[in-house]
């Protein structure tokens, strides 16, 4: 029985392209009857965002906004 691949090798550029494509998709959806699809796409974008590792410098001052 084949198994799912749970290890992906995507670059930062690949992830950026996926995110931009999903945002474009939600803008192109018809305004009526697409609420469920739009919610699923936004949930997916949220999961992608939560998997990112954001850089914070160890030395020096970090100004967050």
Image: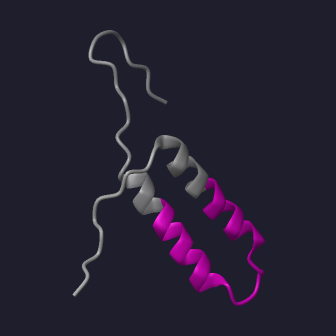
Q: Position of residue 51 (x, y in %)?
A: 35, 52
Rendering quarter of residue 3: bottom left
Q: Quadrant of the N terminus?
A: bottom left
Q: Position of residue 32 (x, y in %)?
A: 75, 87
Tell me if residue 53 is in the magenta stretch.
Answer: no
Tell me if residue 40 is in the magenta stretch.
Answer: yes
Q: Residue at point 36% right, 12% down?
A: 61
Q: Residue at point 43% right, 57% down?
A: 48
Q: Is residue 19 left or right of residue 65?
A: right
**Residue sitting at the far left:** 1
Q: Position of residue 11 (x, y in %)?
A: 46, 44
What's the colour scheme?
one colour
Rendering quarter of residue 18: bottom right
Q: Residue at point 47% right, 67% down?
A: 44
How many dots with numbers?
0
- The secondary structure making up most of the magenta span is helix
Q: Is residue 25 left or right of residue 37?
A: right
Seen from the viewer's position, the closer of residues 29 and 21 is: 21
Please, is residue 35 above or below residue 6 in the view?
below
Q: Is residue 36 left or right of residue 44?
A: right
Magenta-tinted stretch: 20-45
**Residue sitting at the far top:** 60
Seen from the viewer's position, the closer of residues 31 and 47 is: 47
Q: Position of residue 12 (x, y in %)?
A: 48, 42
């Amino acid at each position: 029985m084949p198994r799912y691949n749970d290890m992906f090798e995507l670059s930062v550029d690949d992830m950026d392209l996926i995110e931009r494509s999903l945002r474009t998709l939600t803008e192109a959806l018809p305004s009526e009857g697409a609420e469920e699809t739009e919610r699923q796409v936004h949930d997916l974008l949220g999961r992608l965002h939560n998997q990112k590792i954001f850089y914070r410098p160890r030395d020096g001052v970090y100004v967050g906004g």
